[in-house]
Amino acid sequence: MKRAIILVIDSMGIGAMPDCREFNDVPECNTLRNVCEFNNGLKVPTLEKMGLGNIQDFKGIKPVENPIAVYGTLVEKSKGKDTTTGHWEIMGLVSETPFATFPNGFPKELVDKFVAETNCGGVLANCPASGTAIIEKLNDEHHSTKFPIVYTSADSVFQIAVDTDMIPLETLYDWCEKARKILDDGNYNVSRVIARPYKVIDGKPTRISKDRRDYSMVPSHTLLDDIKSAGGRVIGIGKIEDIFSKAGITHAIHTGSNKEGLELTLQAVKGELDLNKIAYSDYKGGLDFDLIFTNLVDTDMLFGHRNDAKGYGKAIEEIDTYVAKIIEEMTAEDVLIITADHGCDPTVAGTDHTREMVPVLVYGKCVVPENIEKVLGFDYIADLVKSLMSDK
């Protein structure tokens, strides 16, 4: 069986795009290089062997004479710097029109519709904010009013935070689904509605990562649809299912951490993941091809957005240890692709995503290592996966 394994290291960009200032970013943005510099180098021997240090000068990641993988840089075609845009382009869908953002909060008519449809009574915040900061600031008011905390960021997101010890998780998800429908019906062009559940732990409002859900716009068509319609398996690990609004997915499992996502990916590669438990009811099978598609969100959610360059570095080092294990379990026909979807440089001002290029590493026993330098389009990966399918 041919299998493609894609690991998206969420937000691990490698340098500002030429148009970064149009997205309120500075040319100094370079998530990986600046994280390496902050940590006085990273220990990533497997990624180093694959050629990561041959792409750019990353402190502690040495260039090697004979990399074992294809290596290079992907330059985004789409107009955006968010998870949805990046992942959709990875699967062949280029977004030429940027999603809408709301630097002054959401319009009154949208909020009014949300309050009426959900019967939530009202909302708190309605402004761009850091998620961890806004729940700390408004937790007491949230408890006294029971109003959800609704906020956005520099990205196209409608985020809803509630303490699930007070408002049930199922209610939060229902409110998110209603918000998604309102946004779609009103043509607001908002990329994602995000459920942000939290609990007060030891007196501190703490987000519960494993219960986060993303409600994305439905993509018009991606390579995932082609794989599924041909009878192949698309196994989404992490928030992949949410990013594509289930379109083109045949099997899916959410994760609460990078470690869990990496363990599940390793199990999938080893054939130890019980796919029957995570299969969609409409999966019929037919094509002897698997795409194992994993998003590793901690680099972005826990470290990039929180300006934690030290934690970011440790997360990359943890990923490297699992890449080595995955490579050991790969068959002769497997191909491993490692990339990112945008940047989120924790060393520059602000807590938002950054408009960056991303690395790509492609390894397999059937892959001839080479330097592809700079390639226009994250959809290079979709073309690569298509070629693997056509070789069947």
Image (cartoon, helix red, strand yellow):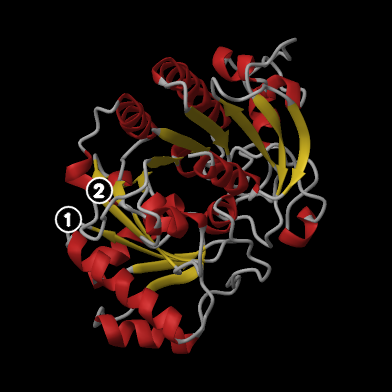
Residue 313 percent coordinates (x, y): 55, 25
Vertical arrangement, residue 145 with respect to residue 70, above or below: below
Whichever of callouts 1 and 2 sits on the residue coming sooner in the sequence is: 1
**Three-letter amino acid code at the position of disc 1:** Asp
Residue 121 percent coordinates (x, y): 26, 81
Query: SS class of the residue under badge 2?
Result: strand
10 Å neighbourhood of mark 2: few (<14), some, or many (≥20)?
some
Question: Residue at the top extreme?
Answer: 65
Please indicate whether residue 351 sits to the left or right of residue 74 in the image: left
Distance Cα–Cα, label 1 vs label 2: 8 Å
Residue 204 percent coordinates (x, y): 30, 44
Residue at figure coordinates x 59%, y 73% from the top left = 100
Residue labelled with disc 1? 165
Quadrant of residue 295 in the image? top left
In depth, the one of 334 and 272 nearer the eye is 334
Residue at figure coordinates x 39%, y 82% from the top left = 182
**Three-letter amino acid code at the position of disc 2:** Val
Query: SS class of the residue under badge 1?
Result: loop
Residue labelled with disc 2? 200
Please indicate whether residue 303 sits to the left or right of residue 228 in the image: right
The tag on residue 187 is none
